[in-house]
Image (cartoon, rainbow, N blue to C red):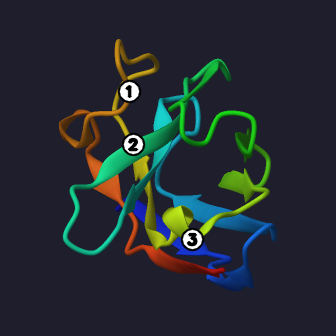
Amino acid sequence: QVLLVESGGGSVQAGGSLRLSCAVSGYTLSNSMAWFRQAPEKEREGIAYISGSGHTVYVTSVKGRFTISKDNAKNTLYLQMNNLTPEDTAMYYCAAAQVRYLTYGFRPSEYTYWGQGTQVTVSS
């Protein structure tokens, strides 16, 4: 059974930082993974992708501020978020695919497994 459990969310002021973790069991980190977020009344959007080999891709809105990484020994995916703004307020989800590489990487339909989410709230 594959299980993804996010943690590390919370409330911070604008300009602050948070590090999200996604503990993974029953799954190999040698496949593609990503972080998505969903704000109230908005669609879920992919923001950071990491391939099985460690290649990373970011959407423009988080590039230069967020860093996705993984620790194979700890079976954990991370998202370091710096210089947070109120626009980053959302529920954040980690997702895992069943292939090593994805052509796009930001479509929810590309991912088979999802965590339950962790809330990030940024105040101005």
> Where in the figure is residue 76, as x and y percent of width and height?
68, 55
Q: Residue furthest front?
A: 124
Neighbourhood count class around disc 2 (C-alpha, 10 Å): few under 14, some 14–19, many 20 upward:
many
User: Between disc 3 and disc 1, whose residue precedes?
Assistant: 3
Whether residue 43 sits left or right of residue 27 in the image: it is left
Residue drawn at x 35%, y 33% is 106
Look at discs 3 and 2 and give the one toward the viewer.
3
> Where in the figure is residue 28, as x and y percent of width and height?
53, 40
Q: Which mark is residue 46?
A: 2
Q: Determine the CA span between mark 2 and mark 1.
A: 8 Å
Look at discs 3 and 1 and give the one toward the viewer.
3
- Relative to the observer, which residue lies in front, 50 or 106? 106
Residue 65 seen in this snapshot: yes
Image height check: is 118 above or below 105? below
Image height check: is 34 above or below 103? below
Residue 71 seen in this snapshot: no
Query: Which residue in the protein does label 1 denote?
Result: 105
Quadrant of image for the N terminus: bottom left
Image height check: is 109 above or below 87? above
- Relative to the observer, which residue lies in front, 38 or 101? 38
State which quadrant residue 68 falls in. Answer: top right
Q: Are marks 2 and 1 in contact (CB under 8 Å)?
A: yes
Q: Which mark is residue 86?
A: 3
